[in-house]
Image: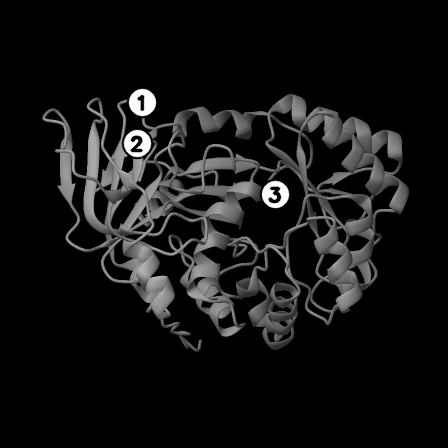
Amino acid sequence: MRTVIRVVALVSAAVAACSAGVPTADVPTDAALVLWNGTLIDGTGEAPIRDGVLAIGSDGSIVAVGRRGGREFPEGATVVDVQGATILPGFIDAHVHNAFSARSLAAWAQAGVTTVRDEAINSGTALDGSLLAQRAAWSEPQYSRLLSAGWIISPPGGYGRLQVSSAAEARQAVADEIALGVDLIKVAVEDGTAGRTDLPVLSTEVLAAAVAAAHERGKRVSAHVTDARFLQAVVDAGVDDVAHVTWDAVSDATYRRMIGRHIPMVPTLTVLEPYGALPTAQSNLRRFVALGGTVALGDDFGGVPQSVSPHFQLGMPMPEILWMAEAGMTPMQIIVAATRNAASVCGLGAELGTLEIGKTADVLVVNGDPLQDLNVLTNVRLVIHRGVVIRD
């Protein structure tokens, strides 16, 4: 795998913004944990803040963030000098599989990937809430937060384990999954993989019924689609995100319609690479970003066996990140994709994804500057999850 890093020099105006015009953050007296003497990248896309400080309350929420003010730190707080390291929001991988594992969730958390979204349960042929119930055992901070899409909805004989043949069955399947405790609904519009093009696909009526049933119950819908022929159908159905960039070229008109409907893309370049689709997929991603599209990080970890794609990494998904950079995304765009945008795709944008007062303190601290070298994302100095230090 090529590991070309696109290095983006900060222009003089951006550098100036890091030290001037940035509000100071006076740490409140009830702060429990304070990180200081670092560079803050808050996940919003704004310029980094030099001499930054981040304070966390006893409830695990952020109580101060910004350039250090003049007030002394509270006497009772734990104060950590990060010695020039970069302070980031915890990363989010918005497309994984086989995540129902204490080992995997702990490994992601240790790498600073504090939330993962399992895009399909691959075990079982019928709805069963027992697997979803296991998540209660992994609620401690040392485990990455786990969201689940349950079972993929598809037509009989199609790409997915939860198979429906009518709009009424689709609505019932959505209701059943939500009753079991899924966090979102996953639909597939896919006629085959590995050379097959004979699988049945969801009709527009059934697809629309599934999306409407999910939205009526306050749940988001993620759409599996890898072929440009089907992208327009999921966009018209009103899904909330597209779970892959397609392997073949997409028209600008389709992308503009997708962007106009505020539907983000989770590219998963890593899973497309072993099929020889990486160049076209990167070209699609480049055009989607240039047109103003929103991208969230996700690599489809576990989507195919590791023998098929050896680039899957349990932890920080560096192959995906580096291929996004090769596609022309800047380091800042990638960081925003992995934090704010991924939180939004997961339906957690109000509580996660950026370093802002009131949000849950999921924090990754790395030695070095990821805006200059994305590889430093694996040089972890500190991880905080739910306000608790889990790696120091």
Question: Which colour scheme appears in the figure?
Answer: one colour
Q: Position of residue 76 (x, y in %)?
A: 12, 24
Q: Position of residue 206 (x, y in %)?
A: 86, 40
Label 2 sits on a secondary structure element that is loop
Q: Looking at the rendering, in which quadrant would you find the C terminus?
A: top left
Q: Amino acid at mark 1?
A: Asp
Residue found at x 43% / y 56%: 335
Label 1 sits on a secondary structure element that is loop
Q: Nearer the viewer, residue 364 or 43?
A: 43
Compared with 150, 299 (above or below) is below
Farthest residue in the front direction? Answer: 21
Residue 120 has which mark?
3
Label 3 sits on a secondary structure element that is loop
Compared with 65, 76 (above or below) is above
The mark nearer the N terminus, 1 or 2, is 1
Give the residue pinned by disc 2: 387
Q: Is residue 213 left or right of residue 54?
A: right
Find residue 20 and report its image quarter: bottom left
Q: Is residue 63 left or right of residue 349?
A: left
- As measured in the structure, the alpha-carbon distance from the residue carrying label 3 to the one carrying label 2 is 29 Å
Q: Is residue 212 left or right of residue 306?
A: right
Residue 59 has which mark?
1
Q: Residues within 10 Å of mark 1 (few under 14, many from 20)?
A: some
Residue found at x 30% / y 31%: 387
Residue found at x 65% / y 70%: 287
Q: Are marks 1 and 2 in contact (CB under 8 Å)?
A: yes
